[in-house]
Image (tube, grey):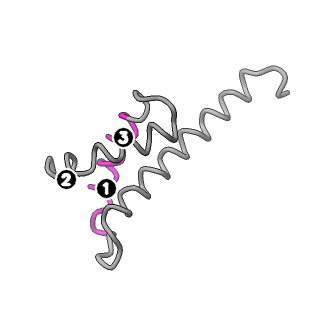
Amino acid sequence: VDALCERHRARLQRILTGLLWDADEAETVTQETFIRVLDKLAEYRPEHEFQAWVAGIAINLARNVLRSRARRAAVTDPSML
């Protein structure tokens, strides 16, 4: 598991920092990605590239964060009402 994380961590950090523009949040999503990968490992299909599968999970989690940010901004911004 540690080798898996170390192999993919730097790449995921770069992708997620670029999407989220927040290094701390990118680190959190990176950790969540590895938890999700371990939970869903049985669903991985070897005909797909593993690195792309992991990146897809990370990007989906980042989209969730971005949607959450947008909802919070809509609630806290009175001009959105």
Left or right of 5? Residue 28 is right
Q: Secondary structure at mark 2?
A: helix
Residues under labels 1 and 3: Cα distance? 15 Å
First in sequence, mark 1 or 2: give its number: 2
Q: Which residue is mark 2?
A: 4
First in sequence, mark 2 or 3: give its number: 2
Q: Which residue is mark 3?
A: 13
Left or right of 17? Residue 37 is left
- Above or below for 20 versus 47: above
Q: Which picture quadrant has residue 31? A: top left
Left or right of 15? Residue 63 is right
Q: Nearer the viewer, residue 36 or 11?
A: 11
Q: Which residue is mark 1?
A: 37
Q: Main secondary structure of the magenta part?
A: helix
Which class describes the residues within 10 Å of circle 1: few (<14), some (14-19), or many (20+)? Answer: some
- Residue bounds of the magenta highlight: 27-43
Residues under labels 2 and 3: Cα distance? 14 Å
Q: Nearer the viewer, residue 15 or 71?
A: 15
Q: Amino acid at mark 2?
A: Leu
Residue at figure coordinates x 29%, y 76% from the top left: 46
Residue at figure coordinates x 85%, y 27% from the top left: 81
- Above or below for 24 versus 48: above
Where is residue 30? Give x, y as percent. Answer: 35, 42
Q: Which picture quadrant has residue 44? A: bottom left
The reply to whether callout 1 and callout 2 are in contact (CB within 8 Å) is yes
Q: Amino acid at mark 1?
A: Val
Which class describes the residues within 10 Å of circle 3: few (<14), some (14-19), or many (20+)? Answer: many
Q: Which picture quadrant has residue 77? A: top right
Q: Secondary structure at mark 3?
A: helix
